[in-house]
Image (cartoon, rainbow, N blue to C red):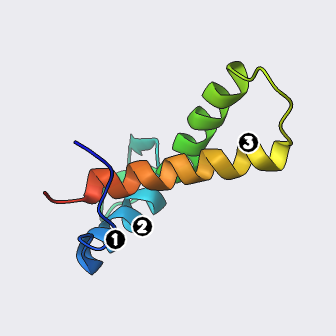
């Protein structure tokens, strides 16, 4: 498994990656939504994944990076993971 071939990434795969990132990370089963039976609140999967990536990056820093640099890298890593998960080989 290598890097995602951006040219092979179909529009469907790209939309699947975007939608997966917009889905809520912590769904709760309950009666708040009678139609679906689920109540979702809080962070999206993309936000939760970027938070985890940022924590990992910050914990291993040995040189000085700006917060903006670390945040940008965390988002880039997250988006690459979402694309990889959506990619059909």
Q: Is residue 27 left or right of residue 58?
A: left
Instruction: Looking at this view, name the residue that lies furthest to the bottom.
Output: 11
Question: Can I make out residue 70 in this image?
Answer: yes
85 above or below 56? below
Residue at figure coordinates x 62%, y 44% from the top left: 74
- Residue placed under numbered mark 2 in the picture: 18
Task: Mark 2: give few (<14), some (14-19) or many (20+) Cα within 10 Å.
Answer: some
Which label's residue is closer to the chain start, 3 or 1? Answer: 1
Q: Mark 2 or mark 3: which comes first in sequence?
A: 2
Q: Residue at x 73, y 42 (%)?
A: 70
Labels 1 and 2 touching (C-beta < 8 A): yes
Label 1: few (<14), some or many (≥20) within 10 Å? Answer: some
Residue position for label 1: 14
Could you say which quadrant of the image residue 61 lies in? Answer: top right
- Could you say where residue 57 lies in the image, as x and y percent from the top left? 65, 30
- Residue lying farthest left? 89
Is label 2 in a helix, a strand or a loop?
helix
Residue at the image position 34 percent from the left and 73 percent from the top = 15
Label 3 vs label 1: CA separation?
Answer: 24 Å
Q: In the picture provided, is 78 more to the left or to the right than 75? A: left
Residue in the foreground of this view, choosing between 21 and 79: 79
Residue 32 is marked as none
What whole-number distance in Å separates the C-alpha atoms at marks 2 and 3?
21 Å
* Placement of the C terminus among the 4 image quadrants: bottom left
Q: Which mark is residue 70?
A: 3
Label pair 3/1, CB-CB below 8 angstroms = no
């Amino acid at each position: 498994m290598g890097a995602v071939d951006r040219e092979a990434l179909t529009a469907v795969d790209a939309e699947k990656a975007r939608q997966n990132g917009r889905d809520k990370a912590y769904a709760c089963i309950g009666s708040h939504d009678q139609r679906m039976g689920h109540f979702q609140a809080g962070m999206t999967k993309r936000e939760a994944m970027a938070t985890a990536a940022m924590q990992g990056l910050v914990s291993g820093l040995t040189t000085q990076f700006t917060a903006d640099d670390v945040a940008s890298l965390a988002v880039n890593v997250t988006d690459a993971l979402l694309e990889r998960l959506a990619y059909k080989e």
